Image (cartoon, coloured by chain):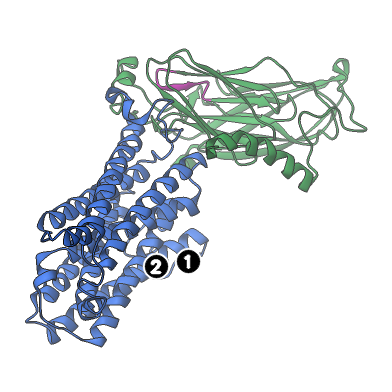
Chain colours: A blue, B green
Amino acid sequence: MVWLHRYSKLVAASTVLLIAAGGMVTSTGSGLAVPDWPNTYGQFMFRFPFEKMVGGILYEHGHRLIASTVGFLTIVLAAWTWLREPRRWVRRLAVGALGAVILQGVLGGMTVLFYLPAPISIGHAGLAQLFFCMTISIALFTSRSWLTDRSSIDDLRLRRLTIFTTSLVYCQILIGATIRHTGAGLAIPDFPLAFGRVLPPLWTAPIALHYMHRVVALVVTIQICATAFYVWTHHRRQPQLLGPALLLVGLVALQATLGAFVVWSRLQPIVNTAHVVNGALVLATSLVLTLRTHRVKLDRLGAVDERSPLISSASALGVRS
Amino acid sequence: MRVKDLRPALAALAPAVWLSACGGQSSSSGPPPNAQRVDESRAGRISGRVVLEGQPPANGPIKMTADPECVRQNPEGARFETIAVKDDGLENVFVYVKDGLGNYYFDVPTQPVTLDQKGCRYHPHVFGIRVGQPVEISNSDPTLHNVHAVAKANQEFNFPQPVPGMKTRRTFTRREVMVPFRCDVHNWMNAYVGVLDHPYFAVTSDGGHFELEGVPAGTYTIEAWHEKLGTQTAQVTLGEKEAKEISFTFNAASAN
């Protein structure tokens, strides 16, 4: 289980890299630099010459190569979990992650073939975050701290608070993805004001979307601070809750700063991508906090409610798993 | 069957569905009822100049370091060609008859218009083409390009040209001013094509001059389009065999 946990952390870390690569594709406007899919300029993608990875191809083809690697790692993760993990719900989660990464690949291909239609591109961005959440969850559920922790935090108010926080962060990420894929990143060209005012003087769809992202960012920040304050006042002696709560405050502060620099730098690709990646880290941290507050609930699903096929057959043969 | 395999069929089907729904005029059909041809012997001419007022902003340098081959092709560096001015005349302006032609019918040329990718730039930068006339896009660079036409009224396309010397033909099926071309590999590369269902268009060159030849008598709206400075229109009434001069004046301040 130790190695499965280490491997699942590797998959989660690779997914961060993949999100960064995807962020660079959109930030540099390279989404259609490779016009065909699944081939690359008519060649099998793994045989495309490295020296031809220039300009936008570097980002788009690089993203495809990293995505393929993450896909392969996820196949191994799903198989490994299926064979070694005694908890049925964790096994199902790993298979779900495999399904998500396959669907993600198909969405990525479709968005290229149909010239980056916003709904597919936004779906691709949204599913990337869900897949990342799955890999983070598997890494958490297979961790030593999760398996050995016997503290029973059963706080309904905190559970509701963290679920709301995580949902809110995810909604904010979807709004951000919509801004990126509809070209509304500079619909309001100044920050912190909007056209020099608190409220924009005119309202178009891109301006409204951009402004909504700013307003929701404020709500998310307040919500995260409120959640962290609740953890501080009620569960200060629980490091498994206090740690992610405090980290969340730091990450959301960094996210707001990056958001400001996205506007000030006129969508500089690296700043823009850092905003995307840090958004994913905010979501992941919020998710970890949420799952830890739900530990008692998840335990009721059963620690070993259904033996995996390999463990079952090993038991039948009298081999200790 | 892959999704990609379905795309040409969908692309072919889409204009037909659109036309049947909107009652539009297809380029491939023959002359519409009551259509007339222009009597060349009685046609006139509209010519003129596009002038830029004020200090033109300098075109910025292009950073081509993303592709070493492009750097090699431009040893002295390259600049954007957004604002091209000679003797106060603005070049790369697409001037065309926007309205007033009525129901004249024009044969579609079969000779292709060429668009070349050379030195990691498009040549020409601005050009016009007829609905149904082929555009032949070639790659004269020792590097790869993708050719992406970001059309709205026409079918958008994006295809690879990885091998030097490749030539690909495409046609536009509907009138559209302008269709931007871009290379997503080299994000500084762009060109614009005006797609029209008549031959009365020109791109200003050599001091901002233009000429529209063989225009029948009538009252027309002439539009001048520039990629950065926007559009201007003028009304012209032309008699038989008459030659008229018009001018457009853009202000450099609006480029900032």
Q: Secondary structure at mark 2?
A: loop
> Which contiguous range is marked in magenta?
B118-125
Instruction: State left or right for residue B183 relative to residue A10.
Output: right
Q: Is residue B124 magenta?
A: yes
Q: Three-letter amino acid code at disc 1?
A: Pro
Q: Residues within 10 Å of mark 1 (few under 14, many from 20)?
A: few
Q: Three-letter amino acid code at disc 2?
A: Arg
Q: Quadrant of residue A148?
A: bottom left
Instruction: State left or right for residue B246 relative to residue A109.
Output: right
Q: Furthest-right residue in view?
A: B34
Residue closest to the eye, B74 or A87: A87
Name the chain under label 2: A
Q: Secondary structure at mark 1?
A: loop
Q: Residues within 10 Å of mark 2 (few under 14, many from 20)?
A: few
Residue B120 percent coordinates (x, y): 40, 21
Q: Which mark is residue A201?
A: 1
The answer, for residue A184, to whether it is visible in the render is no
**Dots 2, 1 in contact, CB < 8 A:** yes
Residue B173 percent coordinates (x, y): 69, 32
Q: Furthest-left residue in view?
A: A237
Q: Which mark is residue A197?
A: 2
